[in-house]
Amino acid sequence: MAATRAEKSGHSAETSALAARLRREITGDVLFDPFNRGRYATDASFYQIVPSGVVIPRTMDEALRALSIASDDGRIVTPRGGGTSQSGQTINDGIIIDFSKHLNRVISLDVENRTCVVEPGIVLDDLNRQLRKHGLWFPVDVSTASRATIGGMAGNNSCGGRSLRYGTMRDNTRSMDAALADGSLLHFGELPRDFAQMNSSDRGSDLFRDMLALGAREAVEIGEKFPKVQRRVGGYNLDALVPRNAPNNIAHLLVGSEGTLALTTQVELKLWPVIRNKVLSVCHFGSFYQAMDAAQHLVKLRPIAVELVDRTMLALGREIAMFQPIIATAVRGDPDAVLIVEFAEEDQAENIRRLKQLGELMANLGFGWDHPQRKWGGVVEITEPALQTGIAEFRAAGLNVMMSMKQEGKPVSFVEDCAVPLPHLADYTERLNAIFVRHGTRGTMYAHASEGCLHVRPVLNLKLEKDVKAMRAIAEETFAMVREYKGSHSGEHGDGIVRSEFHEAMFGPRIISDFREVKHRFDPGNVLNPGKIVDAPRMDDRSLFRYPPNYRVSEFKTALDWSAYPGAGGGFQGAVEMCNNNGACRKLEGGVMCPSYRATRDEKDVTRGRANTLRLAISGQLGPDALASDEMAETLKLCVSCKACRHECPVGVDMAKMKIEVLAARAAKHGLSFRDRLVGYLPHYAALASRLAPLANWRNNSPLLRMLFERFAGISARRALPEWRRDVFRSDIDVVGPADGREVVLFADTFNRAYERENLDAALRVLVGGGYRVHIPKPADGGRPLCCGRTFLSAGLVDHARAELDRLVTTYAPFALRGVPIVGLEPSCLLTLRDELLSLRADEPAKSISAHALLFEEFLVREAEAGRLRLPLGPIAGKVLVHGHCHQKSFGVFKSVEQVLRLVPGLDVETIESSCCGMAGAFGYGADTYQTSMDMAELSLLPAVRRADAATLIVADGTSCRHQIKDGAGRGALHVARVLGMSLERARSNPTLSPVAKEPIHG
Ligand SMILES: Cc1cc2nc3c(=O)[nH]c(=O)nc-3n(C[C@H](O)[C@H](O)[C@H](O)COP(=O)(O)OP(=O)(O)OC[C@H]3O[C@@H](n4cnc5c(N)ncnc54)[C@H](O)[C@@H]3O)c2cc1C
Ligand code: SF4
Ligand code: SF4
């Protein structure tokens, strides 16, 4: 299989010469190895085409140089932004030019005239962050705003959920600068009305005049064949060329051209004032058909969006704890579908007036909440901003739940953005469902009812010929129906490979010939992204699929349990194949995922790039034994195992767990490096190192030893290692606290025990002070202290980790099985008991320990919520700045740190909006990863700590996080147990204070 792909992309001596020339003439990355090419072989469609190579230019000149070198060499060139397209338009053989890493600046901003000029690689959210302070935004709010680039959005003529008011990308593009395949750089914008008569002659003028002539010649045909719906993004925008009273804007021909006509170098955008006031209303319907039929009437009240949520999605939402209260407030009774109608006029009184009108309209249409028997009807008005945000999040998450099916069949995007005129929407959706049923599948519909553009993905397994045939049949029948309604078969996500072959059936042969003429006139050599829009392959050509007919994953043995997923490697294959390339892991702000990508902006260092590499490796497309290869190790090197993807990836791709498999495969094949041994075996030698503390710490104080450690152990000379100490925490206390107190086990992890016993001392004081009876059980085997095995997992020594956990399970099981909570301080250690433990053994004792493992702060919050916490806490006047450990965030338990700190009287608690601290266990100590570690910390954590005044307390529960803060900002940080310990001391020094945490905690 690997050979076939390599031949297809023409990998040869000529390709090496091309790569060499590109490297000589371009300072940006030139990536021609199979691993990198593989990472650029997919977008969010179900296709895969491996390119010959990838160029990541540092400047626009370099991008144009790459175009010229590649076309000199007879290669095709495909521009790329975030690679989130769903139709296969962003992949091709030849050379891919990735604009997203370096070409992402705002070039100019004119606040007064509400315009800006940007480079094509800028991400929409990033642009809007920069505009916000000026009260402006770019409103084409695609769902992929966190990673979609303006170049890609223009390429696809993207549309946001509020296109009813703001229009599509085309409506918001004033002009573009772009390079043709021959290198000529042209400005595309409004043309003077007499342009056709002007006699200037140059490359641009001649081209533009020919285009206007085509528009004039084909005006009637275009008028007849182009659907009259707003959501039409199929084909080239020939209607922009038709003579009219206003000037023609030739840039609008480039919008939606999917990189087939020119490389965009900059885009001038129209900006809008930010929305200041809005109201939402949830309209309830007894049947899906009624909801679809009502959409045409609701839009008359001029909302900015009408979004559909159907029964399936409501049911999915009700199963998710965080959405239950939102649905309970926003949805009443048992509707079959709801339409969420959004009004956003500047004047809030006007929004409220429209809400009232909406209620009347619904009643007039027969959908009032006034029938005693039925469980639907009426309008729930939502004016509270927090609830409005909750509803938006619910809609997004509902789709994610649907996408996260673990079975082989998955919701497939190919008819998902057809648009029909609103009067036909109800009939269209009813007939569409019938088509699905006829082909033995189903699909949930959601999204843009206001534009007649509903998203729907039938569930199919494209590894099976029969499902591919069903897909083709569904596409043909659906598009025929769309044509009947004079709708658009391509209403949002572009043409690519999925849609282009159907243009002829939709637009007719004459328009197709016009499309070809445009392509030929712009790009006679067929250099730019050929095979899209015109002369496309069949959409069901399986040789172009991510899972072609010869796709196989041979059986192999894995170290962890992957049985929740299907496929080889005990399910590892299914887990890897969950990644659908939607690119959410490329977001640059908010949450934690993915810290390494945020630091490097390389596709190699993002969850998606890693998942794709794993898929190619296990299916033999990267040569034999690719899982244990150096390139695979390099692919995962900067993954800090923060587990953010497990939580934040819409389908829960768990790269930290997958990394353990790769490390295990590598350790089995190549053995361990000295550094891996040093890290992995730490629990084994910790006691000895503590006894010999002055000797063991010698390295930190000797520049020579630091240098030797760097050379022979790969530990950065710039890092001080955690200091060993002789007075470690004694974990043989057995039990302490009142005999009648509620029982709790305190897990004294290796790090806090050996390096920072003050945290365990404080936790013990707090627990006993709260009246708990604290067990610190001696290991059942009488040996060295217990450990969670985390360090072994990070070195790929899975059997050693299992052995550590076996000891721990034997010791703790008697407690867990009778319901005693097991409380720990170090997030990564304690949460190993909840997570990896069950991948290593899933027997009852292990399950019980996993179910009873709680972080210190979680335990206290739980106790407080149950009204059981009797902890005397004294005031600490001042501020505390909190940094959350990635694992706390990925398990959704970080909030308890904030909650527990708020129990301390007088303490002002503020959270740092940070991703991973960058230290991540041993990661930050590596000589080869030191710089990335610091880059991660500098993204937000260290600047925030530096800004804090000296009196502010810094709290971080992770040992590594505290080290990073110390190293990078010179500030000591405390475990939350220490702050509570201080507060407890204050209460004791002032016995008139009574326990403060009597009331349950809320919020
Ligand atoms: C889950 C999900 C939700 C989505 N939701 C929406 C939505 O709400 N609305 C919507 O419209 N789309 C949506 N999409 C589709 C897609 O995200 C958007 O079309 C997005 O704008 C593409 O941006 P990108 O940077 O990823 O483009 P890419 O996929 O990288 O590129 C898109 C096209 O533009 C071309 N291109 C890129 N850069 C240039 C350049 N410099 N010069 C010339 N051509 C260029 C490429 O060759 C390609 O043909 C969704 C996709 C997913 C996976
Ligand atoms: S890893 Fe998750 S977030 Fe990233 S592209 Fe894959 S599915 Fe999307
Ligand atoms: S574990 Fe963290 S660093 Fe690794 S891929 Fe997931 S989000 Fe990125």
Image (cartoon, helix red, strand yellow):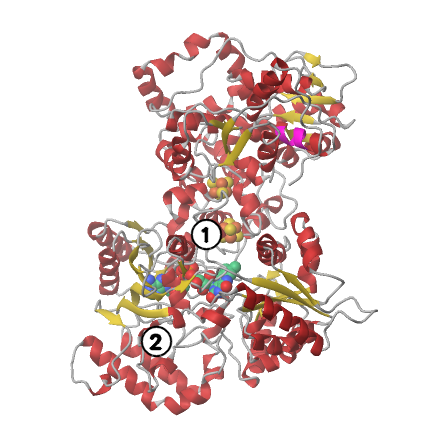
Q: Within 8 Å of ligand 2, the CB of disc 1?
A: no
- Label 1 Cα neighbours within 10 Å, binned few <14 / some 14-19 / many ≥20: many
Is 744 left or right of 700, judged from the image as shown? Answer: right
Task: For residue 86, say whether it is visible.
Answer: no
Residue closest to the eye, 71 or 225? 225
Judged left or right of residue 960, residue 111 is left
Q: Name the residue under label 1.
A: 621
**In percent of the image, x 59 and y 32: which residue is there?**
902
- SS class, disc 1: loop
Q: Position of residue 424 (x, y in %)?
A: 61, 81
Of pointers 1 and 2, the one earlier in the residue sequence: 2
Magenta span? 857-861
Q: Position of residue 510 (x, y in %)?
A: 40, 88
Toward the viewer: 813 or 460?
813
User: Percent from the top left, x then y, of residue 409?
Assistant: 62, 60
Circle 2 residue? 253
